[in-house]
Amino acid sequence: MPMVHIQATIFLDKRYWVGTFERTDKEGYAVARHIFGGEPTDSEVYEFVLTHYQELKFGEPKEFTLEIKHMNPKRLQREVRREMERIKETTKPSTFAQDYIREEIEKKKLQSKKESSEDKQARKEEQFALRQQKKKEKQRGH
């Protein structure tokens, strides 16, 4: 039986409570996102996982490796403090799951842009062909 690890994280994103579901299996790492709206209770999250987990749309599996580097504890503490100060000054911290979701959104944007441009081009070609046909019909009548 294949080994699958699933982790759910519920957090407040501006006005809505959002659930991030991370799945790690033999294919790789994938993330799905679900907006709950109001703050869900533990029982509501559990019920959602039992009933609607199959409906979640996970992105493409992505390969990743976890590298653990051993550092001097004092150096590590300084690095963490610097990183925390940098985060406070700039923006919120970004997790691997959030980066993954951002990449998926960008892919979907590019794909939809490509499809819409192809549709637009096809419509233009149809209209051109229709105009050409009307020109020929007008010429035949005279």
Image: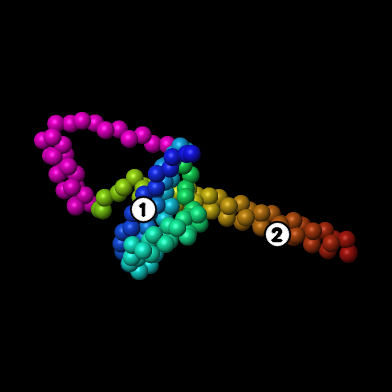
The amino acid marked with disc number 1 is: Ala
Quadrant where the C terminus sits is bottom right
Q: What residue span does the magenta drawing correspond to? A: 63-90
Considering only vertical position in the picture, is 121 above or below 60? below
Identify the secondary structure beneath mark 1: strand
- Taking the magenta stretch, the answer to whether it contains residue 78 is yes
Residue 24 in the image: state x and y as whole percent: 41, 42
Residue lying at 12% horizontally and 39% vertically, measured from the top left: 78
Question: In the image shown, does 34 or 131 lie closer to the viewer?
Answer: 34
Residue lying at 53% horizontally and 50% vertically, measured from the top left: 111
Residue 72 in the image: state x and y as whole percent: 14, 31
Rendered image quadrant of residue 132: bottom right
Residue lying at 47% horizontally and 39% vertically, measured from the top left: 2
In this view, the residue farthest toward the bottom is 38
Question: In the image shown, does 107 or 23 lie closer to the viewer?
Answer: 23
| Number of numbered discs on residues | 2
Residue 80 in the image: state x and y as whole percent: 17, 42
Identify the secondary structure beneath mark 2: helix
In this view, the residue farthest toward the left is 74
Q: Is residue 62 visible?
A: no
The amino acid marked with disc number 2 is: Gln
- The crowd level at tag 1 (other Cα within 10 Å; few <14, some 14-19, many 20+) is some
Question: In the image shown, does 128 or 63 lie closer to the viewer?
Answer: 63
Task: Give the labeled residue for mark 2.
Answer: 127
- The crowd level at tag 2 (other Cα within 10 Å; few <14, some 14-19, many 20+) is few
What label sits on residue 8 in the rendered view? 1
